[in-house]
Image (spheres, helix red, strand yellow):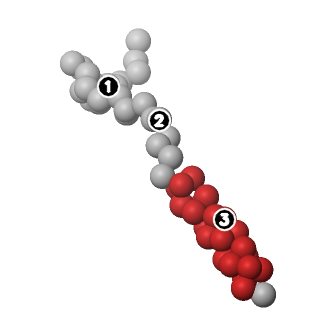
Amino acid sequence: MFARSLSLGVAAAALLVGGAQAADLIIPTTPEPIYEAAGFNWEGLYAGVR
């Protein structure tokens, strides 16, 4: 009886530890590009006449 409960406890602990190790994995990501303001803008008056 003791061996069976011990083996079930070890199996349960092994399953829980496997999930904790998977959560520690590092996912490689690329840094976001830095936004640089343009030297001009498109705001202003537009008449649209010829």
Q: Residue furthest top?
A: 50
The residue at 21%/18% (across/down) is 39
**Residue 16 image position (x, y, % from top left):** 61, 67
Taking depth in this image into account, of 2 and 48 the one nearest to the observer is: 2
Please provide percent x and percent y for residue 23: 53, 55
- According to the picture, the residue beneath numbered tag 2 turns out to be 28
Label ID, residue 26: none
- Tell me the mark number nearer the camera, choosing from 2 and 1: 2
**In the drawing, does residue 45 fall left or right of residue 27?**
left
Residue 17 placement (x, y as % from top left): 57, 63
Q: Is residue 45 visible?
A: no
In the image, residue 25 above or below residue 33: below
Q: Quadrant of residue 15?
A: bottom right
Residue 32 lies left or right of residue 1; in this view the side is: left
In the picture, the disc for residue 42 is 1
Q: Amino acid at mark 3?
A: Leu
Quadrant in which the N terminus appears: bottom right
Q: Nearer the viewer, mark 3 or mark 2?
A: 3
Disc 2 or 1, which lies upstream in sequence?
Answer: 2
Q: Amino acid at mark 2?
A: Pro
Residue position for label 3? 15
Report, in whole angstroms, how far the alpha carbon at label 2 lies from the one at label 1: 37 Å
The answer to whether the residues at label 2 and label 1 have Cβ atoms under 8 Å apart is no
CB contact under 8 Å: marks 3 and 1:
no
Left or right? Give the position of 32 relative to 4: left
Q: Marks 3 and 2, how far apart in space?
A: 26 Å
